[in-house]
Image: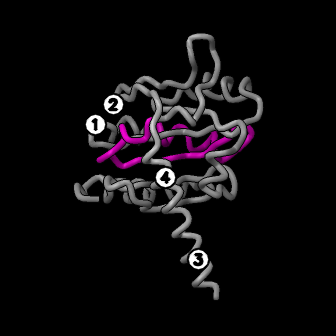
Amino acid sequence: MAWEKQTLAKIKWQIAVLALLSCGGALSVSTTQAAEPSAVSANNKMLPASDINWSKYAGKVVVIDFWASWCGPCRESFPWMKQMQAKYGKDGLVFVGINVDKDPALALKFIQQYQPNFEIRSDQQGKLASQFKVPGMPSTFILGRDGQPAAKHQGFFKAKEAEYEAEIVRLLSNKNT
């Protein structure tokens, strides 16, 4: 019975991710080592997650990280994610941070403090978080080059940084997935 529930949950997650990757929107994406984050519009408002053109990430390893300004482990994960984006962006790694704060001012303050070098978007209504069935903060979903779910993690543990990086390197080295 537990196995059936896990299998069903995994299938639902895959369907949600595939649906997400097939939808479009406007987004300028840079995955180079010196990527400029696109977190805010010209009028200093958070850009919505619903505008992400997921098809631009085809053939890349995509790390989707749901985070909030009040989340302690999120504060620990951002420096590591910045380091990984800088180190592996040229190899096809893309981080997309999805903020779930209800108050965009809190997210903007967090962004100013941590200066991410990867895409940040807002999910104030929690629609995308609901699609992914996010259990808590941070929650990370990793897609292989083929757009298929490869891993997911809840929380961030400094003691597991080498394990997380090895997972990314393995996915980057596989040009077919």
Q: Which residue is mark 4?
A: 19
Disc on the earlier residue, 1 or 4: 4
Closer to us: mark 1 or mark 3?
A: 3
In space, the residues marked 1 and 4 are separated at their CA atoms by 27 Å
CB under 8 Å between discs 2 and 3: no
Q: Residue at x 61, y 53 (%)?
A: 131
Closer to us: mark 2 or mark 4?
A: 4
Q: Which residue is mark 3?
A: 6
At which x and y percent is residue 26?
45, 27
Q: Is residue 80 above or below residue 45?
A: below
Q: Residue at x 32, y 56 (%)?
A: 146
Q: Which residue is mark 2?
A: 33
CB under 8 Å between discs 1 and 2: yes
Look at the numbered disc 2 and give the secondary structure of its residue. loop
In space, the residues marked 1 and 2 are separated at their CA atoms by 6 Å
Disc on the earlier residue, 2 or 3: 3
Disc on the earlier residue, 2 or 4: 4
Q: Quadrant of residue 87?
A: top left
Q: Amino acid at mark 3?
A: Gln
Q: How is the image coloured?
A: one colour
Look at the numbered disc 3 and give the secondary structure of its residue. helix
Q: Amino acid at mark 1?
A: Lys
Closer to us: mark 2 or mark 3?
A: 3
Residue 90 numbered mark, or none:
1
